[in-house]
């Protein structure tokens, strides 16, 4: 996951005094590489509180959101509600678990008691990212996201990713000149290649700020194929996030098999990404069900976290330009997954004549 690594390294360089490691996407990288927040003296000296804090950190690092939430809540309760690390940890865990408003509220609480600039910047960034996701349903929240990123940029002005995020939000608000200026600041600070490419794409066509680009990834399938998203440029890619223990996922297998036969593989690629922990059970299931298309077991949950998958099944449709055009989440009792996918695929120019 070269892109994820570069992002982690960059935030580590920009936010000094590193103490922790990365969580989901941008949010945990922010949390993990921020300077360690301070707690009240009781929290620093109380072994019970420190034990809960460490449990929360460990749960974040392993993407166990509910466990992290409970650990930070308990630590904060024992610290009489005055632990800024607890609030920032809660914000990251809530974000990972899809509880975006709770994440934003936790950031507000952290800001009220934050004692150092690193913690304040971290709170602004996590809240800004949460508001951007919430703005998918309420565009008025983009103005609030802009304010959060500006607040963080005043503290961490040398972080190119902050200028990228701020520029993206400004373009989505139709503040084109300001957005372009921020993207140029991002490039001037020499961001890692994937983020530089994203900034250049938006500078070339500011309308692309409203599109969600899929991060590149590299995997080795059970069939021994080395695959990356970049190699499928120009083709439609469907990512199927599933597990053998998920009944709707199992029920979709025959229709997914038919999907691979319906479309020319030179135009459409299906990749199934399993969340199974039991490798033997997974291998047996795909063999018995003749799942002969690309199969990958996401043992360390890198792809799950890279694409912010929070439910099974989840299907992502990525167009030939690398834009995530659709997310189909969970089973629909009124329409099968393939029917939903086919309805989407019929609208895609790359697949004309395949319907």
Image: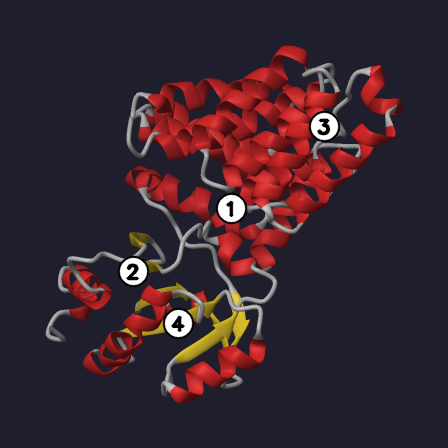
Residue drawn 32% across and 37% down? 206
Distance from disc 1 to disc 4, alpha carbons, whole Å, reads 27 Å
Q: In this view, does 340 lie above or below 58?
A: below
Residue 136 screen position, x and y as percent: 31, 34
Q: In which quarter of the image is residue 343?
A: bottom left
Residue linked to disc 1: 196
Residue linked to disc 2: 319
Residue linked to disc 4: 271
The mark closer to the camera, 3 or 2, is: 3
Near mark 2 (Cα within 10 A), the count class, few <14, some 14-19 or many ≥20, is many
Q: Is mark 2 on a helix, strand or loop?
A: loop
Residue linked to disc 3: 75
Which of pointers 3 and 1 lies earlier in the amino acid sequence?
A: 3
Distance from disc 1 to disc 2, alpha carbons, whole Å, reads 21 Å
Q: What element carries label 3?
A: helix
Residue 85 visible in the shown view: no
The mark closer to the camera, 4 or 2, is: 4
As drawn, the residue found furthest toward the top would be 112
Seen from the viewer's position, the closer of residues 249 and 197 is: 249
Residue drawn 53% across and 39% down? 187
Q: Is mark 4 on a helix, strand or loop?
A: strand
Distance from disc 3 to disc 4, alpha carbons, whole Å, reads 41 Å
């Amino acid at each position: 996951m070269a892109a994820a690594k570069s992002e982690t390294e960059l935030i580590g360089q920009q936010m000094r005094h590193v103490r922790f490691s990365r969580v989901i996407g941008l949010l945990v990288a922010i949390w993990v590489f921020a300077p360690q927040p301070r707690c009240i003296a009781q929290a620093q000296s109380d072994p019970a509180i420190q034990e809960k804090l460490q449990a929360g950190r460990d749960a974040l690092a392993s993407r166990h959101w509910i466990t992290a939430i409970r650990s930070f809540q308990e630590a904060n309760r024992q610290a009489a509600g005055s632990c800024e690390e607890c609030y920032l940890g809660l914000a990251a865990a809530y974000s990972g678990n899809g509880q975006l408003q709770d994440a934003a509220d936790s950031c507000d609480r952290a800001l009220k008691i934050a004692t150092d600039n690193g913690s304040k910047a971290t709170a602004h960034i996590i809240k800004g990212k949460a508001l951007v996701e919430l703005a998918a349903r309420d565009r008025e929240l983009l103005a609030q996201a802009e304010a959060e990123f500006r607040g963080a940029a005043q503290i961490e002005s040398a972080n190119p990713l902050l200028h990228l995020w701020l520029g993206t939000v400004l373009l989505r608000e139709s503040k084109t000149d300001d957005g372009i200026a921020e993207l140029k600041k991002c490039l001037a600070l020499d961001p890692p290649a994937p983020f530089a490419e994203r900034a250049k794409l938006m500078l070339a066509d500011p309308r692309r700020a409203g599109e969600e680009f899929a991060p590149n990834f590299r995997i080795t399938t059970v069939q021994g194929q080395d695959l990356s998203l970049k190699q499928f440029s120009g083709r439609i890619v469907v990512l199927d996030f599933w597990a053998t223990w998920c009944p709707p996922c199992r029920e979709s297998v025959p229709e997914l098999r038919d999907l691979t036969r319906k479309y020319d593989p030179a135009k459409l690629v299906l990749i199934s990404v399993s969340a199974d922990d039991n490798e033997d059970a997974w291998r047996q299931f795909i063999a018995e069900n003749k799942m002969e298309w690309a199969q990958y077991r996401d043992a360390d949950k890198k792809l799950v976290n890279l694409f912010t998958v929070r439910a099974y099944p989840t299907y992502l449709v990525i167009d030939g330009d690398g834009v995530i055009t659709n997310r189909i989440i969970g089973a629909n009792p009124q329409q099968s997954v393939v029917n939903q996918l086919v309805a989407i695929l019929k609208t895609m120019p790359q697949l004309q004549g395949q319907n």
